[in-house]
Image: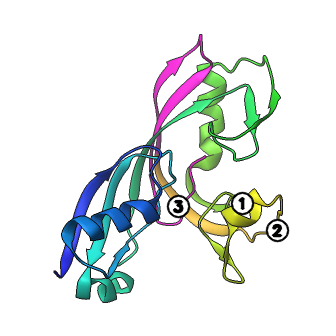
Amino acid sequence: MTGFVCFDKGENITSFFAVKRMSRLMGEKKAGHTGTLDPMATGVMTVALGGATRFIELIPSHEKLYTATIKFGIATDTLDITGNVLETSDKRVSCEEFESALQAFRGDIMQVPPMYSALKKDGVRLYDLARQGVEIEREERPVTIKKLELISHNAEENEFEIDVLCSNGTYIR
């Protein structure tokens, strides 16, 4: 079979596992995806099957839309809620403070990719190095945040839900 399949990737599934599962379901040995989603992330993934895999590199970079929840008061080793808690704080953040801080992230910005990412350094995934306790220097990369909007605020939990429309290669943590 040759073609592209779009599906809704569930939580706690790696992109690699999702592609493997899809290739088995479709009876095609050759398969690849057009972009990695973190295991905790849910959303649409595109898988190329068979001869379509050679066209992945020809697909233009595209924008992505994320809905994310930001929880203040916890710092983890992975920069997301799945990591080991390194620090906690009782500091409360108001909607006004949060909205003001969002300004710095809109437009063309430079971003340092997190260690817990699928990027490779000398052929090794950064998340594999991070799991070994190794942290390497990463270069800033240009990304564009076209839309960054506050959707909701849960003052009791010190959480903010946002919508982000961003360029390919942007990390939301």
The numbered disc on residue 115 is 1
* Magenta-colored stretch includes residue 154: yes
From the viewer's perspective, tell me whether residue 92 is left or right of residue 4: right
- Whether the magenta-drawn stretch holds residue 109 is answered as no
Nearest the eye: 93 or 49: 49
Side of 63 where 69 appears, left or right: right
Q: Position of residue 77 (x, y in %)?
A: 76, 45
Q: CA distance from mark 3 to mark 1?
A: 20 Å
Q: Residue furthest top?
A: 156
The segment highlighted magenta reads 148-173
* Label 2 neighbour load within 10 Å: few <14, some 14-19, many 20+: few
At 48% from the left and 35% from the top, the residue drawn is 162
Q: Callout 1: 10 Å neighbours few (<14), some, many (20+)? A: many
Q: Position of residue 97 (x, y in %)?
A: 67, 26
| Residue type of the residue flagged with mark 2 | Ile
Q: Secondary structure at mark 2?
A: loop
Indicate which disc residue 1 carries: none
